């Protein structure tokens, strides 16, 4: 890695039993050129091939392996043990694209007002084949809050360390929406910029947390939004979108819980979403409620129908 810019990028990879993919992640960091990189893998005590892979890199990769309380604690631990002006985390499911870190450092150097940057990101499958783009969009904090859709792809997001100093670390009580929670907290008083360049890829596979979160995702998302709208420093224009935002949050929690096999939780979120909904949204909620009353059978049947429709010409 050759450095042409004074800024150091500190990248932390939280790791636990992802030996099948971690080499790709590591290589994508080590292959970055034109920037000084400080790289640390924080492993939670893996029992698979992860440590064997790490040892193969010798002194090219700094790593620690010890029990922790999960991914979020590992990231915070790693950030505390690094010193770079720019910080990020890259999961063992994900990779940086060539030249990504150099582009990020260049933008930070030209925009001293910016506290965080995010770019575009691809979804890839277990073999690394591109499935499609992550749904990013130009930055709009009101839309981020109102729509409850995280359009900031975490693998393609980077922070100045000063933002960490001011906003604080990731919330270690969260395991699925800690990144979204951070953008909501950071965007309230700090500048985030969108770089319309592909910077990373995130892998979708059967063991990925984003695929297996179940009802926990909905519980965390609802809690994050309740805390957000309880803040004393929330300006009036954000309080004005509370009704829309909470309706979207409960609807998202209901649909996510249902499709991930938790119909009872889905029905609870349907009931919470109903007062905020109208028109087609109420029809969708009514369908979810009805399918949810069938329990697991309703989920299985809905999956069969959705699969058949996706294959229809």
Image (spheres, rainbow, N blue to C red):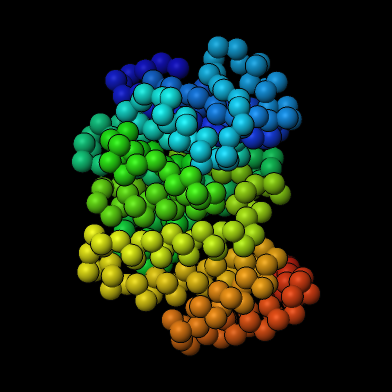
Position of 185 with respect to 89 (left or right) is left
Instruction: Residue at 36% x, 24% y: name it.
Output: 83
* Residue 57 picture quarter: top right
274 relative position to 216: left or right: left
Pick the quarter of the image with the N terminus: top left
Q: Residue furthest top?
A: 59
Residue 93 at least partly seen: yes
Q: Which residue shows up at 54% across the image and 18% down it?
A: 61
Nearer-the-camera pick, 194 or 53: 53
* Residue 179 position (above or below residue 18): below
The location of residue 99, given as percent across then percent down, is 44, 30
Q: Position of residue 53 (x, y in %)?
A: 67, 22
Name the spot of residue 290 as percent of width and height, x first. Answer: 67, 84
Does residue 130 appear anywhere in the picture? no
> Looking at the image, is 292 positioned above or below residue 52?
below
Give the x, y percent position of residue 279. 48, 88
For the point 55% across and 11% down, which residue is it?
59
From the image, which quarter does the C terminus lie in?
bottom right
């Amino acid at each position: 890695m050759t450095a042409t810019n004074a800024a150091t990028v500190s990248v932390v990879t939280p790791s636990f039993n992802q030996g099948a993919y971690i080499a790709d992640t590591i290589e994508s960091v080590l292959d970055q050129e034109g920037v000084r990189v400080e790289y640390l893998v924080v492993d939670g005590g893996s029992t698979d091939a992860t440590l064997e892979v790490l040892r193969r890199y010798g002194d090219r990769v700094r790593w620690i392996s010890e029990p922790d309380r999960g991914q979020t604690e590992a990231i915070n631990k790693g950030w505390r043990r690094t010193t770079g002006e720019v910080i990020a985390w890259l999961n063992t499911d994900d990779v940086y694209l060539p030249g990504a870190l150099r582009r990020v450092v260049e933008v930070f150097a030209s925009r001293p007002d910016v506290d965080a940057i995010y770019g575009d990101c691809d979804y890839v499958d277990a073999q690394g084949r591109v499935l499609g783009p992550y749904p990013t969009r130009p930055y709009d904090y009101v839309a981020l809050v109102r729509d409850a859709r995280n359009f900031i792809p975490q693998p393609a997001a980077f922070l100045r360390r000063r933002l960490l100093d001011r906003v604080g670390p990731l919330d270690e009580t969260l395991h699925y929406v800690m990144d979204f929670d951070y953008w909501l907290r950071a965007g309230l008083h700090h500048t985030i910029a969108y770089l319309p360049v592909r910077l990373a890829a995130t892998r979708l596979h059967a063991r990925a947390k984003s695929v297996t979160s179940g009802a926990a995702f909905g519980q965390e998302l609802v809690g994050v939004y309740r805390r957000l709208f309880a803040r004393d420093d929330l300006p009036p224009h954000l309080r004005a979108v509370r009704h829309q935002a909470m309706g979207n949050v409960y609807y998202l929690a209901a649909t996510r819980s249902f499709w991930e096999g938790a119909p009872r939780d889905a029905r609870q979120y349907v009931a919470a979403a109903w007062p905020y909904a109208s028109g087609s949204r109420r029809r969708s909620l009514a369908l979810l409620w009805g399918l949810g009353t069938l329990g697991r059978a309703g989920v299985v049947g809905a999956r069969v129908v959705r699969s058949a429709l996706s294959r229809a010409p």
